[in-house]
Image: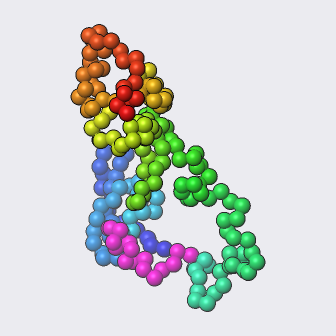
Amino acid sequence: MFNQIIIDKVFVRKGQYNYVVICNHCKTVFKIRESLIKRGKGCFCSTKCAGEARKGIHVSPSTEIKPGQRISIKTEFKPGNKSWSEGKILWHLRGESSCHWTGGSVVSLGYKLIRTTSLINNVYEREHRLIVEKELGRKLSRSEIIHHINGNKSDNRIENLYLFNNQSEHQTYHLLIKNNKVKEIKDSNIKIKR
């Protein structure tokens, strides 16, 4: 549709050339790589010029839709026809209507996350925090840390969970265990706090 107007060929380095070309729209002179010329590019100095030059021009006149023209009998909706989605797997559906729905639970970094609905949106919360909150009968503060006694993050039995007041206590415990200065925790403290 548009042809390159080549003025000059400039040597860059061994086997590579740049071309000096005139823009088909604004008539400015610019340089372009040889590889783009070979692919039929380089008719315009910028995408802005290309867009303005192509306004109103359809790529292929044979596929252009004229006003009042019927597109195709197959694509038009007819009464009694099946819905476009009937019998198909709809990948874009979310939540319970999705074909990938796993019951609202996901595993991330070893922790089991449970989908909880709030007033604003759906939120995934760590299952062990929900279990401890239910056992204590109160909401945990953000600073409170739940420790898995046996080290298995997916084992969320109440006997396997230990509540630390903050991250500092939790990190200190792990440091002391590493240096053999304290015995490992064997029992949960959550039933005691009840």
Residue 161 rendering spot, x and y as whole percentages: 41, 28
**What colour scheme governs how the chains and residues are painted in the rendered image of this protein?**
rainbow
Q: Residue at x 30, y 45 (%)?
A: 13
Q: Is residue 46 left or right of residue 110?
A: left
Residue 162 visible in the picture: no
Residue placed furthest toward the right: 80
Q: Is residue 181 above or below residue 84?
A: above
For the image, the number of numbered tags is 0
Res 19 quadrant in image = bottom left
- In the image, which residues are magenta? 45-60
Residue 15 rendering spot, x and y as whole percentages: 37, 45
In the picture, which quadrant includes the C terminus? top left
Residue 158 falls inside the magenta stretch: no
Q: Which of the two residues, 45 or 148, is positioned nearer the viewer here?
A: 148
Q: Residue at x 30, y 61 (%)?
A: 31
Residue 108 rendering spot, x and y as whole percentages: 45, 37
Residue placed furthest toward the top: 180
Residue 61 rendering spot, x and y as whole percentages: 57, 80
Q: Residue at x 40, y 17 (%)?
A: 186
Res 89 quadrant in image = bottom right
Q: Which of the two residues, 65 or 159, is positioned nearer the viewer here?
A: 159
Residue 55 falls inside the magenta stretch: yes
